[in-house]
Image (cartoon, grey):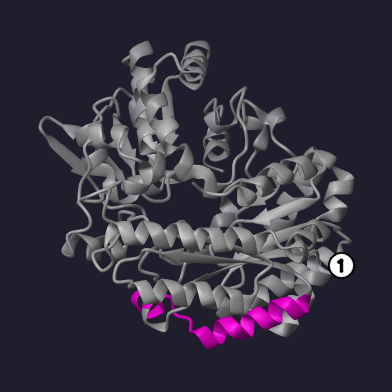
Amino acid sequence: MLGTYLRDQGYEVKIYDADCYSEAESIDYSQLPGKYPEYLRSLKDKKNKIWREVRDVIIKEKPDAVGIGVFTTFAAAAFRTAEIVKEFDKNIKVIIGGPHALTKAAEVLEICRQVDYVISGDGEKSLLALLKSIEKGIVKPKGIRGLSYRSGNNIVSLPPEPMFRDLDNLPIPDRKLLMNEKKYSSEDMGLIMTSRGCPYRCTYCASTKGLAYRSIDSVIEEILTVIRDYKTTQFTFKDDSFTVDKKRVEELCNKLKKKNIKIKWECNTRVNLIDKKLLALMRSAGCNFIKVGIESGSERVLKLMNKGITKKQCRTAAKLLKDSGIHWTGYFMMGVVGEEEDDIYQTLKFMKELGPDLALIGVYEPFPGTVMFEQGIKRGLVNPKMTLEKFYTVNPNDYYKTDPNLQTDLIEQNRFLEIEEEVKEVFRIYNMKVGNVMAMAVSKISVYLREPKIFWEDLKKFKGYAIRRK
């Protein structure tokens, strides 16, 4: 969307997705921790295949500016990319944005000299203003909200732009800007954002607060465009909480049915944002997957998370989802600030009680900009800052921790690792049940028949769930 916006303002834009390079393989996110040592080794190896390809792309395209979207977990890769850009041509402007930039703009500029600018928050207006200033030879522009840069020994920063509210004034993302467009499946191309932000205040989450919507007509237009260009039949609405506005979801479902748009789609939502009537309508309009965050089976921990839900609401939602016939995934978390051993076992017990079609659990990671991050600092679990060396040498799931060998101050670390292995193995075995496997396959059978390649991709991901963690 950002690239399309700049293109429409007269700039030549190409989007290089290094995660889709020539020899890329898909893995499930639950496999990531096991891949981190290999990732860290690659950061030190400038002859690694991916860095060679990044360098080749920069040399071939000779850009005037390179914008890099940064998630905290993979900040090191962004910094290495910035170094590669500057090694080729120090005059290319390197601009960092994304979730990590929202709260760590100053830190990025302090530790990575190859980064020229950082933009925090919604980037459309700020990035456009920055590029116009650079064109005029103004390398230290004033008055651009959300922009941070060095000025002598100081860092100049302005607060971000207010959330971009009129999303219909932004263009539909042009997927043809992707340099490796042909390497994506039709399902990959079906990712759509229909809103920005989230009205909830979970303490572990750094999602943008507030909420802005696109019109349903705009969403329908994008769906039809993707169907036309990529023959997509399986879509994913990536909004943080898709059913916050139930009337809006009803409008989307009714228009999909009225226009006879026969697609399958999935979404993320919360247990307190669904009801029987809504789920029935969603299923009739093609919804085949719903993902909800349960997080914990401990009422005490749910309150620590400021999750805004209760176990009773989770039980009600689980029954509604089962009765609806829509495949549902429950997300759970362990190792959060303030959690005790008994809380983790309550979560394990609660997962079995709810019986989701797929159950996934992750270990909490401290992300800047979250309430729990600040709580971790006060409890001595989290460092407020990172160095470049730590980004390159510490496993990403341990970023900002004062001690990589200490997950929580309430559970001895060796004991925590024992519990983690035990819990993850129970989840793995649970997901291997024949009924769960069949439920997932049946939910996408029409998609598999239309595009067998997606079946094989899903099979690879499913093997990720099945692998026993060591």
Q: Nearer the viewer, residue 258 or 37?
A: 37
Q: Nearer the viewer, residue 1 or 284?
A: 284
Whether residue 315 is in magenta: the answer is: yes
Left or right, residue 91 beside residue 214: left
Q: Residue 225's image quarter?
A: top right
Q: Which residue is mark 1?
A: 258
Q: Of helix, strand and loop, which one carries label 1?
A: helix
Q: Is residue 68 above or below residue 144?
A: above
Instruction: Tell me residue 341's x, y (percent).
Output: 35, 72
Of helix, strand and loop, which mostly describes the magenta segment? helix
Amino acid type, residue under disc 1 in the picture:
Lys
Left or right, residue 225 beside residue 468: right
Instruction: Tell me residue 452's x, y (percent).
Output: 84, 41
Q: Residue 273's image quarter?
A: bottom right
Q: Nearer the viewer, residue 411 or 164?
A: 411
Looking at the image, which residue is at 19% across and 41% down?
A: 156
Tell how many labels.
Answer: 1
Left or right, residue 387 beside residue 198: left
How packed mark 1 is, by other alpha carbons closer than 10 Å (few <14, some 14-19, many 20 or more), is few
The boundaries of the magenta stretch are: 301-324
Q: Is residue 302 above or below residue 286?
A: below
Instruction: Tell me residue 303's x, y (percent).
Output: 37, 80
Left or right, residue 405 beside residue 154: right
Is residue 196 visible in this depiction of the protein? no
Instruction: Tell me residue 334's x, y (percent).
Output: 42, 65
Q: Quadrant of the N terminus?
A: top right
Whether residue 312 is in magenta: the answer is: yes
Q: Nearer the viewer, residue 22 or 89?
A: 22
Q: Residue 154's image quarter?
A: top left
Looking at the image, which residue is at 64% across and 77% down?
A: 246
